Image (cartoon, coloured by chain):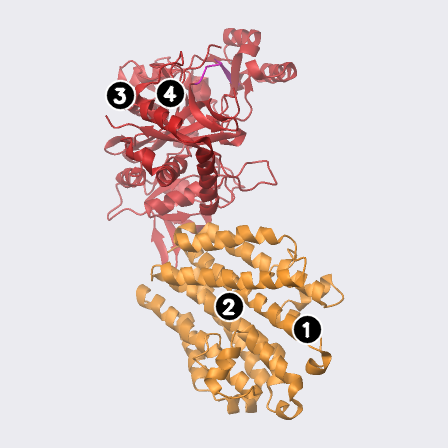
Amino acid sequence: MLSRTADNLYWLSRYVERAEYLARILDATQRLSALPLAYVGASNEWESAVLTAGCATGFFKLYDEANEENVTDYLAFSTANSSSIRSCFEAARHNARAVRTALTMEMWDSINGTWLELKRYGNGPTSREEFSRFLRWVQESSLRFDGSAYRTMLRSDAYWFSRLGVYMERADNTARILDVKYHLLLPDNERVGGPLDYFQWAAILRSVSALTAYHWVYRDSLKPWLVADLLILKDELPRSLSSCYEAIVRNLDQIAGAYGRQGAAQRQARGMRTRLQNSKMDGIFQRGLHEFISEFITENNRLGGAITEQFLL
Amino acid sequence: MAAAFDEMKGHDGDQVRPAYGELAQWLKEVPPDVLDYRRREAELIFRRIGITFAVYGEADATERLIPFDVIPRIMAASEWKFLEKGLTQRVNALNLFIKDVYGAREILRAGIIPEDLVFRNPAFRPEMNGQPVPHDIYVHIAGIDIIRVDADTFYVLEDNARTPSGVSYMLENREIMMRLFPELFSRHRIAPVENYPDELLASLKSVAPLTTSKEPTVVLLTPGVFNSAYYEHSFLADKLGVELVEGRDLFVKDEVVYMRTTQGPQRVDVIYRRVDDDFIDPLTFRADSILGVPGLMSAYAAGNVTLANAVGTGIADDKAVYSFMPAIVKFYLGEEPLLKNVPTWRCREEEHLKYVLEHLSELVVKEVHGSGGYGMLIGPTASKIAIEQFRAKLKAEPKNFIAQPTLALSTSPTCVEEGVAPRHVDLRPFVLTGRNGVRIVPGGLTRVALKKGSLVVNSSQGGGTKDTWVLDS
């Protein structure tokens, strides 16, 4: 297939996944900020949301203060932010339009419908209720797109590149939450923790839609190191780093199989997958959670570069 | 201007023509709100699947829908047979003419067409002189605009020999009609058009260069998502099952064209290009073009790739050349032209110009290189000021213009605000030419001027489209 087509499919999936992630962050932040101060401490949740979304630099160029109004606008509706939910959906639709022939009718219908509906929300919600509805709608749109891709696409390179986009973005997103919130997950926190951090941990899990999953996996109350374990090492959790890499390796292998050729991207991905498989939480904490995550983000970006180099140019 | 011929009711208007019998009956039966409801349903479907087009110069509306009229335009089998013959003849002549212009130039030497009309024409490509093209075919896809003035008279209004568009509407309109009005279909026997992509692909493959050893690789070259016809490009690529490429997806190495794929370079044999000559190769034509492929013309000259349509076919699009078409048909085929030309005054000729200037308020004046209904004057409906402004333009560059009488385009029943009313229509059938001859799917794109009395059917000027039914005898 055309390199440009593969590139568009890859980024189309990434944008949709990113929009969903932003919606989850905003949802979790809204809940946290609604709690009485005694439960969450004096930290600024809205600022934390901007950091987790990875767009603090752009944000503070435009605003002095990270409050609900500014952050909501910037992360969800701003056209000045190329990674706002709106920008993501617009970019996704633009990509989709450029590769219409590689999409199934259902995928096009889903992304085009989302784009048309986006206009209804105009420049922002008029109330918190409406904003909540908006966030739910964003998540549903992403589910619909993902589902239509999964259910209708031919299992060929187009499909594998589009899946790669999903998992590369997801791995990046999960790692970014960990990067901003790692201090909450350190074992020391067990002592300082208590009710103050409980809601923070819950919010982290909520932003990767893993709150219920946590209880099923550990059958335990929220423990920070278990939250880290779930998000990093548990294959069962579809947004864990480990699970993302299982999928990245699988899809890259499919491509290699079909093309009859292995490359740097395959080797690199397999290396990271092996490292994750051989890791234990104790070891990660000993070497430093923060270092581990920073390194992961760098490596993940390198893999993105390798995929681009090998297939998309 | 006499009253227009109506496709359903003829000239006098009291007798329904046979081809429209069932439809007229159905129109009587169907409640008006049902028609209106279906019309809105159709619009919704179009919007949903994203059949839009862009209007140049409208910043606000990058994607607009072409209005779709739910009442079909119907042609009897005998009418279509006649058109089919005439179109085949005309396109055969066009191909011979272009070959001659870039080759032996017999028609110029015979003095049938003035030399400067060819050599000083901006659409003439000196790069094509003496340059053979695979299988001697230049116009692989032609869109011939036809208008009708009475039961037996069809005129060719324009020959589109460069990159005619609109065929996606022909296909989608039929698709939508079958979805919305299955009962109406069951009351007719309508020749299918859905095989058009197959016919197109077969034609394109048949003209692959002789150097192609295996199954030829065909691609569709688009200027990109910002082009007004982008939807059509992606639609066709999808139906053909070929890659939709942009200039940056292709490159030329050792006079061979390749596309960049996820598995490395892949050789390309036939390019169905929807990019104009000017932009196709920055090394040969416009250097500032980012839509083209550097070196493409060298691969073309080496005979390693087929361009459909060929470079330089614009010479046959020219409206002044058009006026010579009857002579062109006679010269190459030794036959009388079946399809008439609209009588045309060439303003480049002094006597013609004089006549045109004296009769501006009765005539339609067009730019010879214009398209899309831009830059033309429709005398009878133009204001005095507009006429005077146009007169100045015309006097300054008479060579750039031709004039034609204001013809009463036939009308066809159309769904409008006040109910069902006659509106003027034209027809663009799509004529394919491959190594094994000409193929035409029965039908084409019917364009309709939705404004009452308007004769301008171009989508960029507020025209709409209809499904075109050719009845099976």
Chain B is which colour?
red
Question: Could you say which disc has been placed on residue B8 in the image?
Answer: 4
Callout 1: few (<14), some (14-19), or many (20+) C-alpha neighbours within 10 Å? Answer: few
* Nearer to us: label 4 or label 2: 4
* x then y, percent, for residue A165: 46, 65
Q: Which residue, given by chain and number where applicable, does mark 3 sit on? A: B78
> Which residue type carries mark 2?
Glu
User: Which SS class for mark 3?
Assistant: helix
For chain A, give the colour: orange
Q: Quadrant of the N terminus of chain A?
A: bottom left
Q: How many marks do you count on the picture?
A: 4
Q: Is residue B207 left or right of residue A45?
A: left
Image point (56%, 88%), residue name? A223
Residue B301 image offset from top left, x and y in percent: 36, 38
Question: What residue type is disc 4 on?
Answer: Met
Q: Identify which residue, B457 or A218, lies in the foreground.
A: A218
Residue B226 is situated, as x and y percent measured from the top left of the image, at 52, 44
Say which mark, if any, is on residue A169: 2
- Residue B330 in magenta? no
Q: Which mark is residue A34?
A: 1
The CA distance from mark 4 to mark 1 is 69 Å
Label 1: which secondary element: helix
Q: Nearer the viewer, residue B51 or B472?
A: B472
> Marks 1 and 2: which is nearer the front?
1
* Residue placed furthest toward the bottom: A191
Which badge, 4 or 3, comes first in the chain's sequence?
A: 4
Residue B109 image-quadrant placement: top left
Q: Are marks 3 and 2 in contact (CB under 8 Å)?
A: no
* Residues flagged by tags 4 and 2 on a common chain: no
